[in-house]
Amino acid sequence: MFFRDSSRRKAKKLGLKGFVRNEDDGTVYIEAEGEKDALKQFLAWCHKGSWLAKVEKVDYQSVSEIKNFPDFVIEY
């Protein structure tokens, strides 16, 4: 939960919209949309995470589809 909550707080601070959730395999899945610079900052943050996080690897892909998320939330 700490990584999800930390990523939600960071995304909101950067003005991003989307969601974060834990996957069954133990990974964390994030979809985010917003300004290009804010997304770059968020991606850089994801590589290190919060002070309690142990990030082993980050896979990402950029897509052009905009989903117009209303907020950035934790999905359960």
Image (tube, rainbow, N blue to C red):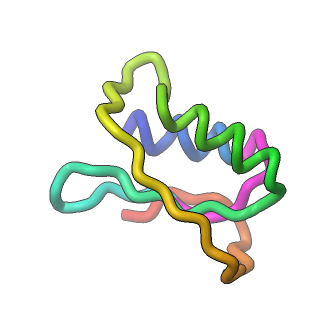
- Seen at 78% across and 46% down, the residue is 38
In percent of the image, x 67 and y 46: which residue is there?
A: 11
The residue closer to the viewer here, 48 or 24, is 48
The segment highlighted magenta reads 12-19
At 44% from the left and 64% from the top, the residue drawn is 75
**Residue 25 appears in which quarter of the rendering?**
bottom left
Q: Where does residue 51 sit, x and y in percent of width and height?
A: 46, 17
Q: Is residue 48 above or below residue 42?
A: above
On screen, residue 58 versus residue 37, left or right, reads left
Quadrant location of the C terminus? bottom left
Horizontal and vertical percent for residue 12?
A: 72, 47
User: Which one is nearer the viewer's eye here, 37 or 51?
Assistant: 37
**In the depicted view, which residue is nearer to us: 64 or 23?**
64
Identify which residue is drawn at 58% across, 46% down. 8
Q: Is residue 13 within the magenta segment?
A: yes
Q: Height in image: 71 above or below 1?
A: below
How many numbered tags mark residues here? 0
* Depth order, front residue of 24/47: 47
Is the residue 76 above or below the residue 66 in the image?
above
Asked if residue 42 lies left or right of residue 46, the reply is right
Image location of residue 61, percent across then percent down? 52, 63
Whole-percent x, y for residue 14 in the image: 78, 43
Quadrant for the N terminus in the image? top left
Quadrant assignment, res 33: bottom right
Q: Is residue 5 magenta?
A: no
Taking the view exactly as shown, the residue that stands out farthest to the left is 25
Question: Which residue is situated farthest in the top direction here?
Answer: 51
Question: In the image, is 70 to the left or to the right of 59?
Answer: right
Residue 42 occupies quadrant: top right
